[in-house]
Amino acid sequence: MTYTPTRDDRATDQESNPAARPLSPPPKLRRRPALVVAAILSICLGGLLGAWAWTATTNTHEVLAARETIPRGAVITADDLQRVRVNADPALSPVAATALDEVVGQRAALDIAAGSLLTSSSTTSDVLPTQGMSVVGVALTAAQVPGVALQSGDRVRIVVTPAGGEAAPSGTPLTSEADVVGTHIDDLTGSLVVDLLVPHAEAAVLAARVATGNVALVLDSGAE
């Protein structure tokens, strides 16, 4: 008598013998071109950003800048300066931060605004005023000066004006020519104080005129 296995017998054999189980095909991988392209772009972008960061850091130099405004003629101290990093530009010639000790103790050759970079022309070892010259401070109200902001090096005239109630004198009024050294606001009076550079022989005359308060400042053209 021949034994024919039933369906239940075949199922039992497959469970007891894993080798007899039918193999299921591996799952098919779905390719996503968009994700591949995005990954490539991310890698390229990261490389570009890294190259830019490397270039930006290697092409910068540490230079000196003014921490606060330094008026012309003032002795420069270490507290007046700060180190900043800037991109190397052939059009600029800032003073390197390594020259700090050389700059400290020199005088400002011109008004150095806060935050501006120092250049070789910003400082000088010459004493201000120079030989044969004097600096006279003139305190003026808004009505005695032009509305244009005065700058170091401006050529001006101090004109004697009549006192209150007096008639204007006939003829050309008395004047004194001078160069502006610097300006600042008097904290107590609010007046504009203008430091003027004049020949030593004319300093006393100008000081006597401005002491009366009856003067006005005239800004002349710097063109020759």
Image (tube, grey):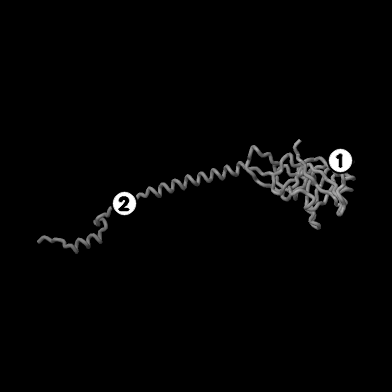
Residue nearest the observer in this picture, 181 or 67 = 181
SS at mark 2?
A: loop
Residue kind at label 2, given as amino acid type = Lys
The percent coordinates of residue 24 (x first, y second) are 27, 55
Quadrant where the C terminus lies?
top right
The image shows residue 128 at horizontal and vertical percentages of: 83, 43
When asked about the image quadrant of residue 73, the answer is top right
- The circle drawn on residue 24 is none
Residues 15 and 172: in front is 172
Mark 2–mark 1 Cα distance, whole angstroms, equals 97 Å
Which residue is farthest top?
224
The amino acid on which the numbered mark 1 sits, given as a three-letter code, is Pro
Q: Which residue is mark 2?
A: 28
Residue pointed to by mark 1 = 199
- N-terminal label among 2 and 1: 2
Indicate the position of residue 33 as horizontal and vertical percent values.
38, 47
Point 69% across, 41% down: residue: 94
Visible residue check, residue 102: no
For the N terminus, the image quarter is: bottom left
Judged left or right of residue 45, residue 123 is: right
**Local crowd size for mark 2, using a 10 Å CA cut-off: few (<14), some (14–19), many (≥20):** few
Please state the horizontal and vertical placement of residue 21, each as a whole percent of the image: 25, 57
Q: Residue at x 90, y 41 (%)?
A: 201
